Amino acid sequence: LFRLAQANPVYLAARIARAVDVDSVAEMTGQVPGIVGEFVRRGTAPQDIGRVVTATADAATRRLIALAEEDLGPAPVEYCWVGLGSQARGGLGVASDQDNALVLSDAAAGIPGADEYFHALAERVCQGLDRAGYPLCQGDVMASNPAWRRTVSDWAGQVADWVGAPEPDAMLHAQVFFDMRAVHGPESLLEPLRADMIERARGSSRFLAHLARIACEWQPPLGFFRGLVVARRGEYRNTLEIKAGGTAPVVQIARVHALAAGSRQVGTLDRLLAAAEEGVIGHSDAANLIEAFRFLRGLAYRHHAAQIARGLPQDNNVDPSTLSGKDRHRLRAAFRIIAAAQDALELRYRVGQM
């Protein structure tokens, strides 16, 4: 019973909330891979596993913020620590890095030393998350980077620039920031920004078309006759990437459809359902993408659990020959569904003419 209790994410989050220092936080989050493996063995739904991993990351973030404030003193103004990307969507994996930002009250602009305070806080939290098993973002999309630490008004201006001039760098940053969720601090700081962001995106067919183009660039590993295509050489020979060719394009497709529908949903499945309700995508098409996404996420967690059990680093490269005949069939079907959804997106937004 005690062992089962320790594998309970609620129990783990409660222990993290009482951690006395950064090392204690890291020690507790180190249990997450084992918990994921246990949940995979139990047959837990992939979306529930994602919520568990994300909830643990949220708890670690909040505790690290509290520890930083104990050392630095109370914040000079209100602020909101924002989880971005897969953390915002509730879909963190055991190998996910960190993406985050800070949204500060506009009052911060007039307070001497405010920027230095939040820089110090962000550095402590981001480094603490790295020690806790959430690696630093290679693209530097973190609150420790001044570009991702702004006041509400500055963020609104940045979003307007991204949407108004959808250049490659702007699109890269916008798609990350459009997947946002408050992890710590008053969500009221985010609401006006979120409403403005969605309204701007929905009203810009050019911006949506650029998002659609990005969604169509993530090609499923299918051959001319819609068979599976594996890498022929290199470290990942005879494997295929189920994130780059599978879950990532679904995330992108769902984001485009949700923004076109004016939805505030952030989770990929919720976005597809909301877009279907608004008539942006057909109900059957949304259901097919949801089923494909769930299968691919479940396959990824099973793959990660097997690597954890063998003491190997986690990746998303799966060898189809190790799968059952049924799973290989479902894998081909999932990739075909995604390819068809991309074809529809290309046609709707005239991606080929861009």
Image (cartoon, rainbow, N blue to C red):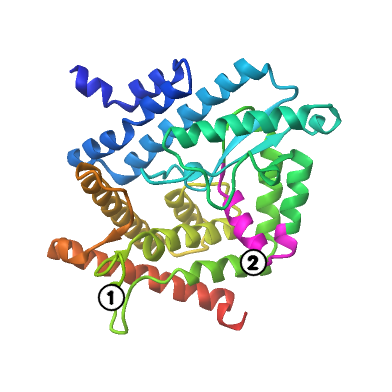
Side of 173 relative to 272 (left or right): right
Q: Which residue position holds label 1?
A: 232
Amino acid type of the residue tagged 1 in the rendering: Arg
Please identify the quarter of the rendering in which residue 329 is found. Answer: bottom left
Image marks 2 and 1: residues in contact by CB distance under 8 Å: no
Quarter that holds the N terminus: top left
Side of 221 relative to 77 (left or right): left
Residue drawn at x 70%, y 42% as measured from the top left: 146
Instruction: Name the residue furthest right.
Output: 110
Crowding at dot 2, Cα within 10 Å, few <14 / some 14-19 / many 20+, comes out as few
Residue drawn at x 38%, y 18% as measured from the top left: 15
Q: Viewer-proximal residue, 86 or 120?
A: 120
Q: What element does badge 2 sit on?
A: helix
Side of 102 relative to 338 (left or right): right
Q: What element does badge 1 sit on?
A: loop
| Structural distance between the alpha carbons of marks 2 and 1 | 30 Å
Q: Which residue position holds label 2?
A: 168
Q: Residue 247: say if magenta.
A: no
Amino acid type of the residue tagged 2 in the rendering: Pro
In this picture, is 12 found above or below 278?
Answer: above
Residue drawn at x 48%, y 62% as measured from the top left: 253
Q: Position of residue 103 (x, y in %)?
A: 68, 37
The magenta segment = 162-180
Q: Viewer-proximal residue, 138 or 303?
A: 138
Q: Earlier in the sequence, mark 2 or mark 1?
A: 2
Side of 192 relative to 229 (left or right): right
In this picture, is 138 found above or below 42?
Answer: below
Q: Position of residue 307 (x, y in %)?
A: 24, 48
